[in-house]
Image: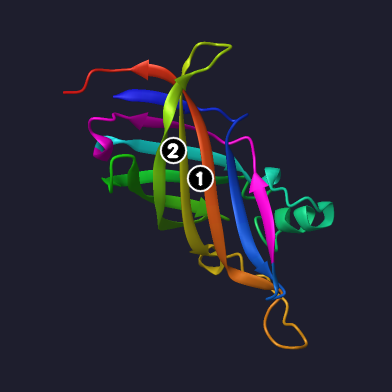
Amino acid sequence: MTTWTIDHTHSTAAFTVRHMMITTVRGSFSDIKGTITYDPANPAAASVEAIIPAATVNTGVADRDNHLKSPDFFDAPNHPELTFKSTSVQSTGENTAKIIGDLTIHGLTHSVTLDAEFLGQNANPWTKAATVGFTASTKINREDWGLTWNQALEAGGWLVGKDINITLDVEAVQVAETATA
């Protein structure tokens, strides 16, 4: 089993949400930290733990970002981290898996399933460290995590959609390799 540390400089958690029912807002979180344990011969034994600082939310609009950090949404001062901890991994193909785990946002925890793909391994050209890449995605209803702020639109509908599409792009560096029993 090999342990990898998420490279926060080359990893992002991106999201999209409908805005005014007519367009999509894109945003991301940075400075992701965490570990991945992975054995290509036994993907089901893999595990993932990740911590995402709520205050790193960035949609490219400072006023919106500040609103997202406020108690109306992430309440970053009181809930500074979004966390994910896998509970099981189910291989779905040669380089794909479903990663089931507990996602905590705004102090509330619910199970989610990430559709993940192993993108490959290479040596970092500067450090020579073994480095792997993964991508994963899921869709959540933000209201399940207490992110319920919204505003009705005069023409009908809501300002902010409920469904959030999440895409994770993760690069991780090998830190340890241990024998498996």
- Where 38 falls versus 20 (above or below)? above
The residue drawn where x is 63% and y is 64% is 17
**Percent position of residue 147, x then y:** 61, 65
Say whether residue 110 is left or right of residue 38. Answer: right
* Amino acid identity at mark 1: Thr
Q: Is residue 8 above or below residue 95?
A: above
Q: Which mark is residue 83?
A: 1
Q: Residues within 10 Å of mark 1 (few under 14, many from 20)?
A: many
> What is the span of residues highlighted in magenta in the rendered image?
24-44
* Secondary structure found at label 1: strand
Residue pictured at 73% horizontal, 77% vertical: 151
The residue tagged with tag 2: helix, strand or loop? Answer: strand
Residue 119: x and y, percent? 43, 35
Q: Earlier in the sequence, mark 1 or mark 2?
A: 2
In contact (CB < 8 Å): disc 1 and disc 2: yes
Residue at the spot 23% in from the left edge and 18% down from the top edge: 179
Q: Residue furthest bottom?
A: 155
Query: Where residue 106 is drawn, which disc sits there?
Result: none
In the rendered image, which residue does mark 2 sit on?
49
Q: Residue furthest right?
A: 63
Assess disc 2: are there few (<14), some (14-19) or many (≥20) residues with their C-alpha within 10 Å of its C-alpha. some
Nearer to me, 146 or 121: 121
In which quadrant will I find the N terminus?
top left
Q: In the rendered structure, which amino acid carries the disc numbered 2?
A: Glu
Does the magenta run of residues contain 42?
yes
Is the image coloured rainbow, by chain, by secondary structure, or in one colour? rainbow
Q: Position of residue 58 (x, y in %)?
A: 72, 48
Query: Considering depth in this image, is 120 or 178 the residue closer to the camera?
Result: 120
Q: Residue drawn at (23%, 33%), measured in percent from left and top?
A: 42
Where is residue 168 shown, x and y percent of the image?
52, 45
